[in-house]
Image (cartoon, rainbow, N blue to C red):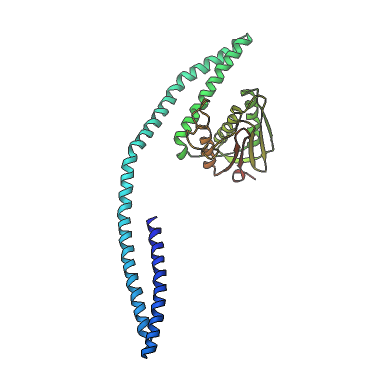
């Protein structure tokens, strides 16, 4: 801002000087004509004045840049010191989360193994349904663990690419989506599309969008998924979003009355960035939400 002001002020003063010089030069030539003198003296007088003003502004500019060179390192150093406690707190929290997730894995594995064993021996429908809910709860916790761990290393994650048919993957997931919440129907239409991408991450990205759509859709609503012309479109007619530009921010939660950590769409954006994909998001409150992901860069011909 200071530099911009300096140049604007300099240009303004030069314009004023230019006008003043024209008037003085005209007056000088008029006097010289009366006295019979040559106009060269008038021209030299104007040039000397401009050169003098240029030297003054040159000195000011040099002083300004010297001061700027001194202030920038000082400002960077002070900013580093002031932000250090925040950075250390974030690293401590990340380390704590990482430790908790790994500590949960052992008892979670025991619960899952026993529930799967009981599933084979249970006879009554009521007990089978209860056991299925236990297994679903375990799967939910495992999914949350994956999201937490990925969020800690998203910026330095290295893709493990492979070639696979995205159409087949989405068909398999569509069956799962319709079992998660049977009151919301997930409809998929697509065609074969071979891509070169990190398959687990692509599954995570699609899961997060679709499960979010299911979560915020009313009873008997429909969530549509389309895979056409190397573009993936996921659309719902749920509650929509008030601030769609902010939903990709880490820990952002627009509706705090529901469960969640605000990581789902942050992970979607992170996976897309790792694969260099673009996401178009259109959403309006009470009108629904549409995600369009361009997959052309991943397509294998």
**Which of 209/200 is in front?**
209
Total marks shown come to: 0
Camera sees residue 217: yes
**Relative to 263, 225 lies left or right:** right
Query: In the picture, residue 286 is in which quadrant?
Result: top right
Decide: is 96 above or below 29.
above
List x then y, in percent, for residue 84: 33, 39
The residue positioned 39% from the left and 81% from the top of the image is 27
List x then y, in percent, for residue 139: 54, 23
Name the image quarter holding the N terminus. Answer: bottom left
> Quick one: which residue is furthest to the bottom in this view?
36
> Quick one: which residue is furthest to the top in this view?
124
Decide: is 150 above or below 107.
below
Camera sees residue 37: no
List x then y, in percent, for residue 194: 64, 40
**Which of 212/116 is in front?**
212
The residue positioned 40% from the left and 26% from the top of the image is 99
List x then y, in percent, for residue 170: 64, 33
Decide: is 120 above or below 146.
above
Query: In the picture, residue 279 is in which quadrant?
Result: top right
């Amino acid at each position: 801002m200071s530099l911009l002001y300096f140049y604007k002020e300099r240009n303004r003063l030069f314009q004023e000087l230019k006008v003043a010089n024209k008037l003085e030069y005209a007056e000088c030539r008029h006097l010289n004509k009366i006295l019979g003198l040559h106009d060269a003296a008038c021209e030299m007088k104007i040039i000397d004045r401009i050169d003098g003003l240029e030297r003054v502004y040159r000195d000011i500019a040099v002083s300004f840049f010297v001061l700027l060179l001194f202030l920038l390192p000082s400002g960077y150093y002070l900013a580093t010191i002031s932000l250090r406690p925040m950075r250390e707190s974030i690293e401590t929290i990340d380390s704590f989360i990482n430790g908790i997730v790994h500590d949960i894995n052992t008892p979670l594995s025991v619960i899952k193994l026993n529930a799967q064993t009981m599933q084979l021996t249970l006879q009554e429908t009521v007990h089978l349904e209860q056991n299925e809910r236990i297994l679903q709860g375990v799967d939910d916790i495992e999914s949350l663990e994956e999201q937490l761990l990925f969020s800690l290393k998203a910026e330095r994650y290295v893709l493990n690419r492979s070639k696979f048919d995205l159409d087949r993957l989405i068909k398999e997931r569509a069956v799962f989506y319709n079992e998660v919440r049977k009151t919301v129907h997930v409809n998929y239409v697509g065609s074969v599309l071979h891509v070169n991408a990190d398959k687990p991450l692509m599954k995570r990205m699609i899961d997060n969008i679709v499960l979010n759509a299911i979560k915020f859709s009313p009873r008997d609503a429909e969530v549509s998924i389309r895979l056409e012309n190397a573009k993936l479109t996921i659309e719902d007619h749920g509650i929509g979003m008030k601030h769609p530009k902010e939903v990709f921010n880490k820990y952002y939660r627009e509706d705090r009355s529901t469960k969640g950590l605000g990581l789902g769409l942050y992970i979607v954006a992170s996976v897309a960035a790792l694969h260099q994909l673009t996401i178009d998001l259109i959403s309006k409150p009470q009108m629904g939400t549409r995600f369009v992901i361009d997959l052309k860069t991943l397509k294998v011909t």
